[in-house]
Amino acid sequence: MGKISPVAAKYIIHTNIEIEGIVDRPDVIGAIFGQTEGLLGADLELRELQKSGRIGRIEVNTETRSGKTKGTIIIPSSLDKAETSIVGAALEIIQRIGPCNAKLDVTNIEDVRISKRSMVIERAKELLKKMMESTMPDSQELADEVTASVRVMEIVEYGKDRLPAGPAINESDEVIIVEGRADVLNLLKHGLKNAIAINGTSVPETIIELCSKKVVTAFVDGDRGGNLIIKELTSVADIDFVTKAPDGKEVEEITKKEIHKALRSRISGEQAKLELSKEPERTSMELVKRQQPHGQPHQQFQRPMQRPYQPIPSIRRIQISAEEKNKFKSMLEDLIGTRGAEILDSKLSVLGKVPISEVQTTLKSMNNVHAVVFDGSIEREIVKAAEEGNVKFLVGMDSKVRQNETRVNLLTVNEL
């Protein structure tokens, strides 16, 4: 007889069977064929349908308990929906199997195609997820690799010392000096094409000539080696600005965001000189402290007692000129939203730009500050630092200190 497997069937008839007695599997199959014979006509005769392969192998699963038999019957069908329903309903007319009374109940006619469709959808989801996880990153990596290779190809050798540099050194008004070739490549990778490497600790003649022609920013690693290079550069060349990578990091490994943040917070070369010149003093003081016996601090290095802040009364006011007023107003407008501060000398030239949080530290380390313009409120601590540094003007968004409490001239947005 021709047979079909449940895999090739379109529908599966699920039937529960209850028999009041003990029977075998052949008895159940015989009753199905025998009691439905001639019932549905020649076209739906179960034996003929099974021979032609339109009804598959009839599976009977039974178990006997307490003298009664229970189980299930599974019949695969490739007939259409109506014919399959007729065959299923015909099974319920069987009332005796062998010598025992029986009851058959068709519980469900399963559409196999729905189950297969659900399986296809779930599998398609898995395949799509794998494709998005594996194929898309590969394409992105390929694009990144091509872009990186093009940028590496852009690196050139500049000057008689054949220093690694970006392709825009000649046409750029500003130049970034870094330590090595890897630093230049990292800046190229993030779109900065005006970097040049000194290739060592000694400053080449090419760099000295470049510093005399262009606005130069020294961008060094955030370690002691970076400080040494700053000292060397500032001693032999005219460096306009200085900035460093985050502490403990090198320029070649920092991200695009860290690069731009470092360049925005650069300081003037003069300020960098002052800060570095104070380092040996601090180091020697710390060394002497470590050499003192425990419990016997040297009198020379004891910290003086801090006195509460007392405002210094105004002695003489400096009249602000129209040029200074216009300059302060323009700078304050440019600083809105940046939370930054700009340090000016007596010629209204910018000595450096720092975050507001570093204004006090900066004022303590410099002695030629004429004015400070910043995007923030004039606090008492900033006023105190300005008095100690002989600053003439503090320009902020608003002030929490009264003018008669300090000799520093305080200017706000409303007054400008």
Image (tube, helix red, strand yellow):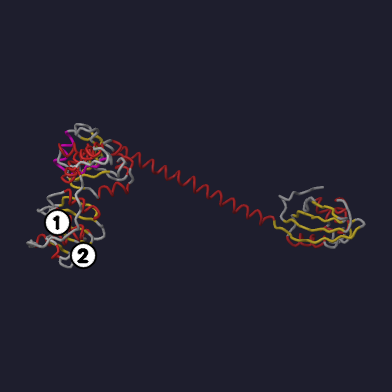
Residue most toward the front? 295
Q: Residues within 10 Å of mark 2 (few under 14, many from 20)?
A: few
Residue 214 magenta-highlighted: yes
Q: Residues within 10 Å of mark 1 (few under 14, many from 20)?
A: some
Question: Which quadrant of the figure contains the C terminus?
Answer: bottom left
Residue most toward the bottom? 414
Q: How far from the left and from the top, in percent, is residue 406?
A: 14, 61
Q: Residue 285's quadrant in the figure? A: top left
Give amino acid for label 1.
Glu
Give amino acid for label 2.
Lys
Segment tinted magenta in the rendering: 205-220
Residue highlighted by disc 2: 400
Q: Is the residue 412 above or below the residue 196 in the image?
A: below
Mark 1 vs 2, N-terminal side: 1
Residue in the foreground of this view, choosing between 69 and 137: 69
Q: How far from the left and from the top, in percent, is residue 213?
A: 14, 42
Q: CA distance from mark 1 to mark 2?
A: 16 Å
Q: How far from the left and from the top, in percent, is residue 403?
A: 14, 65
Residue 382 magenta-highlighted: no
Residue 279 is labelled as none
Residue 387 is labelled as 1
Q: Is the residue 378 above or below the residue 255 in the image?
A: below
Q: Residue 99's quadrant in the figure? A: bottom right
Task: Answer left or right for 116 relative to 283.
Answer: right
Q: How far from the left and from the top, in percent, is residue 251?
A: 30, 41
SS class, disc 1: helix
